[in-house]
Amino acid sequence: MMPAARGHLAMLAFSALVAGSFALGSLAAGYIAPAALNAPRFVLAAMLVGAGAAMTTGIPRSTWRAPWRYLLLGGAMGLYFVLMFEGLKTAPPVSAAAVFTLTPVMAGLAGYVMLRQITTPRMALALAIGAMGALWVIFRADLGALLAFEVGRGEVIYFWGCAAHAIYTPLVRLLNRGERPVAFSFGTMLAAAGLITLAGWSDIEATDWAALPGIVWITLIYTALFATALTFVLLQYASLHLPSAKVMAYTYLTPSWVICWQVALGHPVPGGLVLAGIGLTVVALFLLLKDETAVLR
């Protein structure tokens, strides 16, 4: 299988695993501060990925060249996850997932500015369709709210987190110096764990860990194992073999996966008008995946 094809499979798995963060995160966000949740999550994820790298490909000494690279990458990812859980305190999971689908547009812009990756007319059309579908879901299929641009506070907070995520994607390609994805992910997660711990130490100290409900621990373990450790490796691999906009195109599947998670957790299926917006994001995904003429550098 060609590296590009493996990159596509990696992002398909990525989108399904990330969706679980929205469904579970919305249930846990009200019980714990975002930094207090994400600090141990990244510590645990870094331990898992580090152990996996040591037992398989190893972590060469050259991995630690220019450690400032990991601070940039870890800062971007740490900011994304902290703002995600802050936003989920008030934003519904499907609506937050729709905000996430705006990331390909921002990733495409960042990819051009940082790497001169070209967005072809087909990709631009796909990004526009996906953004339209995302906005329709964000405004709950309410034309009046859309025209008045009534955006929820949680969605606004999470939008800035998604901007950090969009910058992260081309940064991986720009800063990677031949390191293997697992070792590179370990350095990034280690930096993210340290930065979040330092920035959120007061929240960590103030948390009554023994009194936290089970859903918080379930969310912490799931996000550490699947939505951090595994998805980091998947995203790093895909970012090295696909253009930034194409990597993030798979975020268009996230609202659909979130609906599957929500239904599995006992929530009702969204209304038909909201589903129409999600349908546009799926159309955008297929348009992006069919376009193989983008310049990849």
Image (cartoon, rainbow, N blue to C red):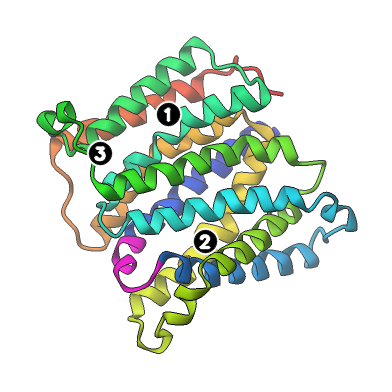
Do the residues bearing badges 3 and 2 touch, measured as CB atoms within 8 Å? no
Question: Disc number at residue 226?
Answer: 2
Asked if marks 3 and 1 touch (Cβ < 8 Å), the reply is no
Residue at point 36%, 27% (across, down)? 130
Dot 3 crowding, Cα within 10 Å, few <14, some 14–19, many 20+ = many
User: Is residue 135 shown to the viewer in this render?
Assistant: yes
Relative to residue 167, is residue 218 drawn left or right?
Answer: left
Quadrant into which the N terminus falls: top right
Image coordinates for residue 218, horizontal then vertical, percent: 41, 73
Q: Magenta residues, as a range?
A: 24-33
The disc at residue 242 is none
**Front residue of this view, candidates 114 and 203:** 203
The residue lying toward the viewer, choosing from 195 and 267, is: 195
Q: Secondary structure at mark 3?
A: helix
Q: Nearer the viewer, mark 3 or mark 2?
A: 3
* Residue 138 marker: 3
Q: In this rendering, is residue 282 above or below 226? A: above
Q: Residue furthest bottom?
A: 210
Side of 201 where 271 appears, left or right: left
Query: Mark 3 and mark 1: span between their CA atoms?
Result: 18 Å
Give the mark, 1 or 2, whose residue is nearer the N terminus. Answer: 2
Where is residue 83 drawn, in percent x and y? 42, 54
Q: Amino acid at mark 2?
A: Phe
- Mark earlier in primary sequence (3, 2): 3
The residue beneath circle 1 is 285
Circle 1/circle 2 CB separation < 8 Å:
no
- Say whether residue 258 is magenta: no
Q: Quadrant of the C terminus?
A: top right
Q: Earlier in the sequence, mark 3 or mark 1?
A: 3
